Image (cartoon, rainbow, N blue to C red):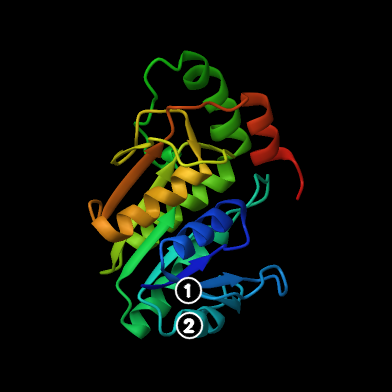
Amino acid sequence: MRIAVFGANGPTGRHLTGQALAAGHEVVAVTRSPGALTERPGLTVAVADATDPAAVDAAIAGTDAVLSALGTRFSKQPITTYSASAAAITEAMAHHGIKRLLAISSSIADPNWRPTGAHFFNHVLDPLVNRRLGRTLHEDMRRMEAVIRRTDLDWTLVRPSGLFEHPEVTDYLTAETSADGVFTARTDLAASMLRELEERRYVRTAMGVVTTAVKPNIAKLIWNEGVKKK
């Protein structure tokens, strides 16, 4: 399958691109940073701003599916990256007749998500980090989800929990709407997206993804994912 990966140069996008190539897919890696990725067998690099409709349209031409691993840092200012890119991507997909879309969102988009047994997270970290520091980011993720839901594409909204780095794919869990867990390894997130691309278990709904076999250092996770500058 020939797939377009948006945010291919990002921390999740790199895992997604590498795993897709290893699985035998052809990948169009879409990035706005020229020279950030090097073309190799099976990999084509397309330079495009994901919020630019014309650039997006050109980047996805000839692909069979689109996977979005776009992301940004927490900010006090309004964020529009997710919703603006969703509008550009879905419009281009409709233009080219591409039906399959998987886009990374967050478990936070489910208002009822409360991981079992995670008292400190549910009552301290979640209100402080996700609902306050990450408020503008998650507001735009919800707008992105709304944009995608209004289309007639075969979409899947992929909702990980707290993202962290881990070198290997684990026995991750998936569930409709959101999954019961606090953390998601990026390797597992990428693997779950590629599996869903093939299995189509969560078409036109949300798929929660969590890692249970390993856990990250919480303080390091908050610093790396939400605070530290690139």
**Residue at image x 59%, y 26%?**
128
Number of on-image labels: 2
Q: Earlier in the sequence, mark 1 or mark 2?
A: 2
Quarter of the rendering containing residue 9:
bottom right
Quarter of the rendering containing residue 219:
top right
The image shows residue 214 at horizontal and vertical percentages of: 50, 27
Identify the secondary structure beneath mark 1: helix
The image shows residue 41 at horizontal and vertical percentages of: 54, 76
**Residue at image x 42%, y 58%?**
103
Q: Is residue 69 visible?
A: no
The reply to whether dot 1 and dot 2 touch (C-beta < 8 Å) is: yes
**What is the three-letter code of the residue carrying label 2?**
Asp
Q: Which residue is mark 1?
A: 88
Q: Is residue 121 visible?
A: yes
Vertical placement of residue 153 versus 106, above or below: below
**What is the three-letter code of the residue carrying label 1?**
Ala
Name the foreground residue: 67 vs 77.
Answer: 67
Name the foreground residue: 39 vs 128.
Answer: 39
Any mark on residue 57, and which? Answer: 2
Crowd rating for badge 2 (residues with CA inside 10 Å; few <14, some 14–19, many 20+): many
Query: What is the CA distance from the residue labelled 1 to the residue labelled 2?
Result: 8 Å
Identify the secondary structure beneath mark 2: helix
